[in-house]
Image (tube, grey):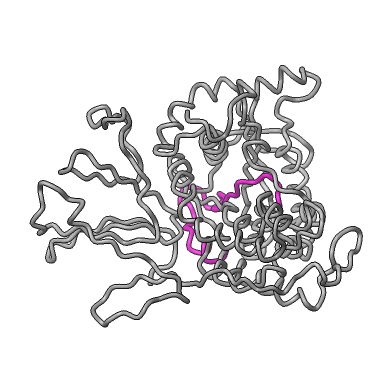
Amino acid sequence: MIEGPYAFVYLDKKQEKLWFSRDFLGRRSLLIRHWDTQTLFLSSVAGSNDDEYKDERGGAGWEELPAQRVFCLDLRCESLPFSYSSCIATYHWAYRDQVPPVTAEAFQPTIPFGQVVLDQQQTPSDPELRLEDGFPTTSDEWRPYVDGLQAVLSQSIRQRVESIPIQDNDPSAPRVGILFSGGVDCITIAALLTQMLPQTEPIELFNVSFENPRQTKAHGASSSKYNVPDRLTGIQGWRELCRIDPLREWRFVQVDVPYSQVLEYRSHIRRLLVPSDTVMDMSIGMAIWFAARGIGNAVSDTGAETPYTGKAKVLLLGMGADEQLGGYSRHRSAWDRGGIEALGLEIRLDVQRIATRNLGRDDRVVSDTSKEARYPFLAAAVVDYLSTVPIGRKMDMRLPRGIGEKLLLRMLARRLGLMQASVLAKRAIQFGARTAKMESSNTKGQDSL
């Protein structure tokens, strides 16, 4: 089995079949468009000018190709060229623990992990964790799980960086960058990454901040328009990394985006989002695109700023941690509603639908900047491991916000010396970087663009 992010379109000339698919977590983009009954388009990104193929609704008709399926178009099908839809066979991926009996001739793609275990290990009657300075101690019950997460996440990061070539024209250039808000997901990646790269190799940390005219109007010019929440936690996290590994050059890049650039590039970013088309898609996509582009100012430890453009061609992103480790507010709501059982069901559902969410969108946005996004938390081995860890050993919603959710990851961050980052509450990128509600407070995330 091929493990990793991929999307492919493969023409088997001998068998006269066209195979196409995305990986089982949907980490790479592949779009499909149906135009009349005779024409099928497949592409990693929507065309820049689709006017020729407008559908009856006025849109270009692009859709994300569903992940967790392999499609095969039989080019010898009798219905062609009049209809292709009846000529496509669909093979659904099955979780490893749910593979149905098949014959030797049958094709059954298998996901290399099972469903999230719904273990009732933690109940409200369990003793409270012992706290030191407001944070749970890593007890004997938790230590094996922290060890396990550190091992699989370290291996995932290593696999994603060890083969990156050195740039011929600049051997000292950074090979890896991280989209960096200072939150526990990205900073833990950084703290593990520094253990496996040569000490002389810089690591780029891209921290994005937007001029938000509505916020500026509300608060005036009393403070810098770029001192947004993610900038403050980003600087705090950068200093923590400098403390735990002072010999590493942590190249902190402040990507400040004036509102004029938002207006200049918004239509371009919107084309990359297709078929995603909500206000939230734009807010998130814009933050990722500018951060991945990496044009800003490198900041020294004395505070001096130098114009800088990112050099790394591979970017590590923290997507996938929230779904698996209980990072969303809906996970705490599930706990409040039905305890550990409801929480487990919510986590299982979130992991099941990772493939249907926004990784294709994010892939299109990052790839447009000539960079490649890689997701350590979404390695099959990491998902496999976390799927077997009891719910009550990944999170503890009896503890306050900023501690109880993603508790297993916070314990690992604490072990790595990230004391401040380990207690930061989750903040969505569109609010942390201030891309949300730039013009009006009345727009909602699910509104269409």
Q: Main secondary structure of the magenta part?
A: loop
Residue 380 relative to residue 67: left or right: right
Is residue 345 shown in magenta?
Answer: no
Can you see residue 334? Answer: yes
Quadrant for residue 148, please give it: bottom right
Quadrant for residue 209, please give it: top right
The residue drawn where x is 33% and y is 72% is 108
- Residue nearest the observer in this picture, 26 or 129: 129
Q: Position of residue 132 (x, y in %)?
A: 91, 63
Q: Specify the farthest residue to the right.
A: 133
Stretch in magenta:
157-183
Residue 191 relative to residue 71: left or right: right
Location of residue 167 with respect to 209 vertically, above or below: below
Q: Specify the farthest residue to the front.
A: 338
The residue drawn where x is 58% and y is 49% is 177
Location of residue 382 with respect to 248 vertically, above or below: below
Can you see residue 150? Answer: no
Q: Position of residue 46 (x, y in %)?
A: 34, 38
Residue 386 relative to residue 418: left or right: left
Image quarter hosting the N terminus: bottom left
The residue drawn where x is 35% and y is 43% is 63
Q: Position of residue 55 (x, y in %)?
A: 26, 32
Q: Specify the farthest residue to the bottom.
A: 104
Is residue 161 shown in magenta?
Answer: yes
The residue drawn where x is 46% and y is 32% is 269
